[in-house]
Image: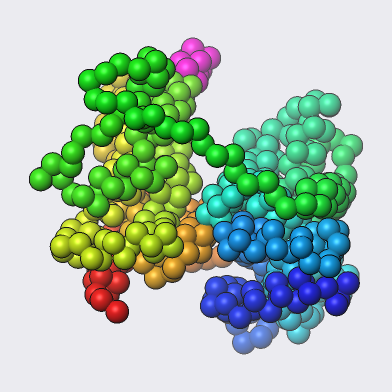
Amino acid sequence: MISNPIIRKEVISSLRTYKATAMQGLFLLALAALVFVRWPPDGLQDLRGSQARQLLSLLAIGELVLVVLFAPAFTAAALTGEREKNTLESLFSTSLRPWEIAVGKMLGSLAFLFLLVLSGAPALAGPFMLGGVRGQEVVAIIGMLLLTAVYLGLIGLLVSSFMHRSYRAIIVAYAILLVICFLAALPAWPISRTLITRLDPPWSDILQVLASFSPLQAMLSLVWPDSTYTQNARGMPPFWQIYLVVGASVSVVIATVLLFKLRRPIAPPRPREKLKVVERGKISARTFLFVIDPRKRKKMIRWWQNPVLMKEFRTRPMLQAQWLLRAIGLCLIVSVLLMLLIGLSVSAFVSETASMFQMMTTAVAALMVALIILVGPAMSGGAICSDRESGVWELIRSTRLPSWRIASGKFQAVIIPLLLLVLAMLPALVILLYFETGLWPYIVRILYVVIVNVLFVSTAGMLFSSFFSKTSTATAWTYAIMVALGLLTLLVMLGADLFSQRFITAVLTVNPIAAAMDAAGDQTMARYGLLANHLKIVGAATAVMFLVTIVRVFQLRRPD
């Protein structure tokens, strides 16, 4: 197994990349920051060892979060990257057996995640210097992290086996991991009023098993067994014990599926049917099925239109009109469902109408920002590097267009679709305003936060897209930054009694979801006073990234 050339090739090639070096550095830097923040002053320790246990739990959760954050970046592009280089089919013409190829790709892709976990082991052993921590606890945490690396890494690899483009595989992998790690655990958290403990069997048992799919919930139950976030259903074992069975079982199933799927080269994508262009002014059968017929000949670009912007909307699949209309329609459906929920809430809680409207406004604001976090990197991650990969950038460089107009077209192609998606979510806010006119100041503040974060995610994606030559890499870094700012920083709320009020405020200030909840009048976030500082920090960061991106576009525009 050690002599498998695919394993050696995967490990060596991944460790030689700048991406691996940067991720390893960020991983160790984050762990060092946690130790620095929570290390007892002057090295003093209490007799019960509670400070050492708090430090160990924070390091365990922090390392788990980093593994979750980095897993898709390495495994989701393992197979699609081979397909893009046209090297996957050549592996099956060698003397390697199909199972050796499959095992080599799996172990080679997971090797870097193993190195991440093992490199963080010395930090987990740091609390031994304070006393009060048993070796069995550290070993259990490391075992949980290794299982999580295998569990999430195989999910990313499975996604990669079904996709044909690396950036699409990374987008799908991040979406699946967010659902598994966060949404699956919500029934066990106070935000749902600990739904698991309020239901009777078998529904409570089913929800506990579903929540045990989340590695975050499992780690919380291991290091904070008495927390309000880890209340078990009656008669059920702790979450981490169920997770050991679930994680191992899912890993075995996925590995088996990959072994069967990689017995032969992955089938190429089905060729699209030949498109017959329909002249403008003529009516085709598709005109009645689609609002915009993708086969209809487009109009000529007007003199006042940006050619780069028009090129982006006509060539990039996610920006084409028919797909944008479908996305907007999906957002409108979500808005209608929210309206229905509001109506049911008003009829069921007549005596709590004002508070219910405030809660629903907070939910809509958080949903709008979460939509930006999930969709924004997919829109902006390949703005420039996709043209560099396909060779189109060389054609753009040879045109007479000035650099500022090229950059302007790229920015508009990212910002306009995101603003359209935001507009599609506005009916939910409009219906809230109809029932409660006093919500108008809160809605205006929500729109400020949403617009600022649309500009931020667009600029962040453009920045990474201008510095990286691969769309998958730029998309992965954009997702990592947005997920870290929008979701992972919320984890400080789990340790509200461990951190100071000032530290929690500083962390939540950069969180767009927390700022949107503060803008909507949420009482929990309002006591931190996040809105004003969030707008200043995010606005300044957006301006800096915009200027750096403009400079980078000018550099790429110059002849070699």
Please report the residue visible at 65 percent of the width from the left and 76 percent of the height from the top.
Answer: 13
Q: Residue 434 in the image: x percent, y percent?
A: 30, 19
Q: How is the image coloured?
A: rainbow
- Tell which residue pokes out farthest to the top in this image: 347
Q: Is residue 260 visible?
A: yes
Q: Residue 438 in the image: x percent, y percent?
A: 28, 28
Q: Is residue 361 visible?
A: no
Q: In this view, does 367 lie above or below 98?
A: above
- Observer-nearest residue: 156 or 1? 1
Q: What range of the chain is rendered magenta? A: 339-351
Q: In this view, does 440 lie above or below 227?
A: above
Please report the residue visible at 68 percent of the width from the left and 46 percent of the height from the top.
Answer: 267
Relative to 95, is 388 on the left or the right? left
Please report the residue visible at 23 percent of the width from the left and 59 percent of the height from the top.
Answer: 406
Q: Is residue 129 above or below residue 480?
A: below
Query: Which corner quadrant holds the N terminus?
Result: bottom right
Relative to 299, is 314 on the left or the right? right
- Observer-nearest residue: 518 or 203? 203
- Tell which residue pokes out farthest to the left in this image: 303
Please report the residue visible at 59 percent of the width from the left and 50 percent of the height from the top.
Answer: 164
Relative to 222, is 495 on the left or the right? left
Q: Residue 241 in the image: x percent, y percent?
A: 86, 51
